[in-house]
Amino acid sequence: MSTKNLIKPLCLLLALLAVLQAPLLANAQTAKRLSIFDPLLKQPQLFSDTFDIATDKSNLGKWAVTGVLTAGLLTYDEEILLETQRLGRRWGISTVDNLKPLIKIGDFTILRGPTDFSSGLYFLGDGWIQLGTASAFLLTGALMDETRPFNTGIELFTGLTSATVFSQILKRVAGREGPAPRTRPGGAWRPFPSWTAYQKSRTRYDAFPSGHVMVTTLTFTIIRGNYPEYESILFPAQIVYLTALGFGMVNNGIHWAGDYPLGIMLGYLFGKASLRMAQPSVKSNEPEKPTALFEPEVSPTIDPTGAVLANLEWKF
């Protein structure tokens, strides 16, 4: 079967995934219904919650794994790229980004769509897929008067907005060159490019981290968090989905493998923070226990000579 014959089935599968998954999962309620305005009004709180989760000591291990994987992959990114593209050619998959404009307003492209199997893999991480999924949940919840899918849609819109903004900031900070336009093995790093330079040639600066992987991980994190009873289906689906997307973007010369670990970690963190939106806040008269890193406690103390000193205690 040629790759051209796979284009229509792939596009149909993507459309069905976005439209049908929300009604299939809409079968339960949660206590608090979110507002349609929350994707705008809750942005400051979501960034705050993301930082809180990111600095929680329970996530130290995840950060360590992210760092080790990133360092290891960065070292071998060029070799991984070449081997992935060799596999793509062996399997008859194009190594070129063949997304084509489908909807344009003047010179501005609204939507680019896949034209072959290779670009179909890349399109798995496109923002339109994530926005379509969020819209499907939101509309299902509104039309069926179901709180859980409605909240899922709101959380997706809120998280996608925050994650997209943050990823764009990080891309401009890192300034990593993509595989296709690379000027040296592994791509050059040009931190803090000017606004004009970045806009003129985005692929020279926007590889790290992967925004596609970030928003895809965020989407699955939120859906899995709201529908834990489907974990046995959703988690394997996430692994397969990210694997296909990751392969497609390296094969097309869009991203390096080293761009992925941080994207996955950040997508997870923003997803977890988004899930807090519908969770009731718990108030207690008991003093809060330290849950985050870098929470020093300072208290006075007297040494054996009688001198008054400050005692600094750092809890992990």
Image: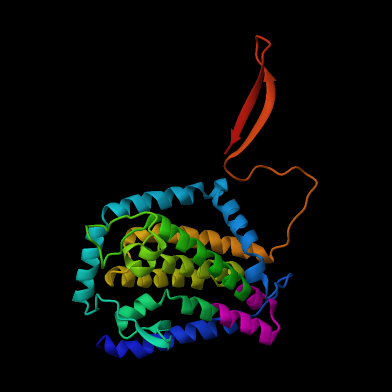
Q: Residue at x 71, y 83 (%)?
A: 145
Q: Tell me: residue 239, above or below residue 297.
A: below
Q: Residue at x 65, y 59 (%)?
A: 45
- 173 relative position to 286: left or right: left
Specify the segment rendered in magenta: 134-152
Magenta stretch: residue 174 in it?
no
Q: For residue 33, what is the image quadrant?
A: bottom right
Quarter of the figure that contains the N terminus: bottom left
Mostly what secondary structure, the magenta segment? Answer: helix
- 192 relative position to 50: left or right: left
Identity of the residue furthest to the right in this view: 285
- Residue 245 image point, x, y percent: 37, 72
Q: Residue at x 50, y 72 (%)?
A: 234
- Residue 220 image point, x, y percent: 51, 69
Identity of the residue furthest to the top in this view: 305
Magenta stretch: residue 139 in it?
yes
- 53 relative position to 198: left or right: right
Kindly tell me whether residue 229 is visible in this rendering: no
Q: For residue 185, what is the image quadrant?
A: bottom left
Kindly tell me whether residue 268 is visible in this rendering: yes
- 267 relative position to 255: left or right: right
Q: Tell me: residue 312, above or below residue 42.
A: above
- Residue 19 image point, x, y percent: 53, 85
